């Protein structure tokens, strides 16, 4: 019979039908505490130069954004089709970052 922060009461109390509405309201308010209020949504345009997240990192010292690519089109929502090494790949906006000159090594982005 432990108090649960997310539902606002003990778990055995939460399963009772008389408490369902109270638990639902408390859960909604509790979720709002974790929403990032100043989250910046990335919107890329066609032909934007981007860096693609490196999923094959072996150590924490490896580069996070390593591959270079170019936005071809917006598939749907936050998913973009990116041209990388003459291949089309789909990546979420959270896996992309705008590229500026000299970002990776001494090369210009694409």
Image (spheres, helix red, strand yellow):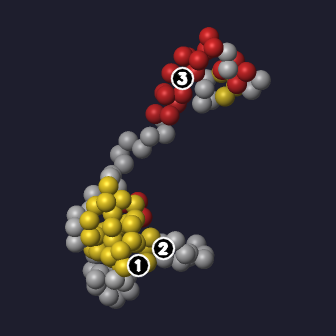
Relative to the observer, which residue lies in front, 58 or 76? 76
Which numbered disc, 2 or 3, marks the residue that appears first in the sequence? 3
Q: Residues within 10 Å of mark 3 (few under 14, many from 20)?
A: some
Q: Residues within 10 Å of mark 1 (few under 14, many from 20)?
A: some
Q: Residue at label 3? A: 24
Circle 3 SS class: helix
- Rendered residue at 52%/71% (across/down): 55
Quick check: 63 above or below 36?
below
> Helix or strand or loop: what does disc 1 sit on?
strand
Q: Is residue 15 visible?
A: yes
Residue at x-position 43% and y-position 78%: 66
Residue 54, numbered circle: 2
Q: In the picture provided, is 13 more to the left or to the right than 86?
A: right
Q: CA distance from mark 2 to mark 1?
A: 7 Å
Percent coordinates x, y for residue 19 in the rendering: 61, 14
The residue tagged 1 is 67
């Amino acid at each position: 019979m432990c108090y649960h922060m997310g539902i606002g009461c003990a778990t055995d109390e939460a399963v009772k039908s008389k408490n369902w509405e109270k638990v639902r309201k408390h859960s909604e308010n509790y979720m709002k505490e974790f929403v990032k209020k100043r989250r910046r949504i990335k919107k890329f345009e066609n032909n934007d130069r981007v860096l693609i997240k490196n999923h094959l990192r072996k150590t924490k010292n490896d580069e996070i954004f390593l591959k270079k690519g170019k936005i071809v089109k917006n598939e749907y929502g936050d998913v973009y089709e990116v041209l990388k090494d003459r291949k089309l790949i789909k990546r979420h906006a959270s896996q992309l970052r705008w590229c500026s000159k000299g970002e990776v090594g001494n090369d210009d982005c694409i």
